Amino acid sequence: MTHELPASQQHDEPMPSQVEPDVPDAPVEAAAPDAATAAPAAPASATPTAASGAHRIRTLLRDVAGRLSTRRRMPPPCVARVFDGQRDGKPWFAADHPVIVDQREREELLALLRSGSIVVRASQPLRDDLGDVDAAVPADLRSDGAWIWSDAVAYYLEHHWIAPDPELVAHLRAAGPAAPIDAETWRRVSAAIRPDAWEGTTWPLD
């Protein structure tokens, strides 16, 4: 169930939203040739050790090609909004921003939000302007590979019942708890994060 925030919190300047693993090969045993049809001994360059090495190279090349193909197909991660706008450098929530009053619903969303892997640790917590508390809002960035969101989202949900970005909520509910992201996903997510877009108190507003 959602309700609107008190009109007293409305503001007048809204902003628009907006390494590969070295896997050893399994041992291969060649069948003993028939004495009458046995072929001449193979040269040293074609020994099982050399053949195994060539097989490993081919396997690694296929693996790299597969990873590059997957990387090309993967869209950049979406970034969840925290606030509705900013005024004089301070973020704010719109008066009609939905709130979640149902405790069970909040707890379920908090568990989903906190299941994401931390991809960036903030240097310090931010000010909570709603509660008028300094250094209270965690600002680490989390991701499940498809979305990136700030721990500020969970903070405002837990302490002020502020509903997260609805598109993020829909994604998390459909996907379920996030599994730890692998190294390739971590690199892709990290490449999508611009430091100038999250180091301020208003990350992310665009």
Image: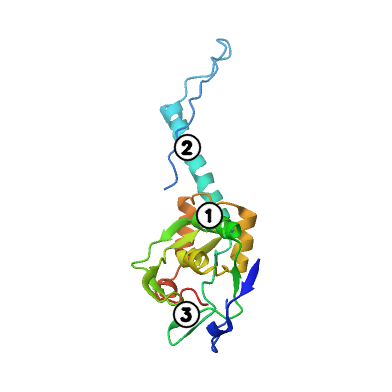
Residue count near mark 2 (Cα–Cα under 10 Å), binned few <14, some 14–19, many ≥20: some
In x, y percent, where is residue 63? 52, 45
Expressed as whole percent of the image width and height from the top left, the position of residue 133 reads: 38, 73
From the viewer's side, name the closer residue of 102 and 71: 102
Residue under label 3, please give it: 91
Instruction: First in sequence, mark 2 or 3: give its number.
Output: 2
* Three-letter amino acid code at the position of disc 3: Pro
**Please, is residue 41 above or below residue 54 in the view?**
above
Q: Amino acid at mark 2?
A: Arg
User: Residue at 50% across / 53% down in the picture?
Assistant: 115
Q: Check disc 1 and give the amino acid type.
A: Ala
Q: Which mark is residue 168?
A: none
User: Picture coordinates of residue 64 (x, y %)?
Assistant: 50, 49
The residue tagged 1 is 111
Q: Which badge, 2 or 1, comes first in the chain's sequence?
A: 2
- Where is 206 relative to 60, above or below? below
Q: Nearer the viewer, residue 141 or 104?
A: 104
Q: Secondary structure at mark 2?
A: helix
Distance from the alpha carbon under mark 1 to that under mark 3: 25 Å
In which quadrant of the rendered view does residue 96 lie? bottom right
Q: Which residue is mark 2?
A: 56
Give the camera-side residue of 18 and 126: 126
Which structural element holds mark 3? strand
